[in-house]
Image (tube, grey):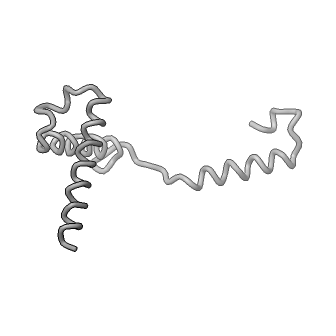
Amino acid sequence: MLDDLPMVDKEIQDKIKHIDDLFALSFKSRKFDGEKGEEVLSIKAFERTCIYIRNANYHSNPRLMPTIQFFTALDEIKERNKSRSNAKSNKNQ
């Protein structure tokens, strides 16, 4: 593809190819299909998060929550749990 660009000399082409190769090697390829594919793992993570929100008595059906409300609830639950954990740690000291 770079060969088609007449204004790019060989040295610059080599540098660009080297950078492209670094990018290609720095990211692990992912499998999207099958039992352990990204799609299935994402769905399972979402389902676990819905259960987590429901069990925290934040919302009876997290699937019906708008996205921003869903993630805000998750953040608030995490903060509440963090505060409880810190309170326990301070109490045990």
**Whole-percent x, y for residue 82 in the image:** 26, 55
Q: Residue furthest bottom?
A: 93
Whole-percent x and y of residue 53? 18, 41
- Count of numbered circles on the image: 0
- x%, y% of residue 50? 19, 39
**In-front residue for pair 26/66:** 66
Q: Quadrant of the C terminus?
A: bottom left
Q: Residue at x 31, y 42 (%)?
A: 42
Relative to residue 45, is residue 5 drawn left or right? right
Which quarter of the picture shows residue 89?
bottom left
Q: Residue at x 17, y 45 (%)?
A: 52
- Judge by depth and name the residue closer to the eye, 8 or 85: 85
**Quadrant of residue 2 in the image?**
top right
Q: Please say if 86 is above or below 9.
A: below
Q: Is residue 17 above or below residue 61?
A: below
Please give left or right for residue 9 compared with residue 22 in the image.
Answer: right
Q: Nearer the viewer, residue 34 or 91?
A: 91
Residue placed at 30% from the left, 50% from the top? 36
> Which quadrant: the N terminus?
top right
Q: Tell me if residue 7 comes above or below residue 28 in the rendering.
A: above
Of residues 10 and 82, which is closer to you in this image?
82
Q: Name the spot of residue 87 as percent of width and height, x first.
A: 21, 61
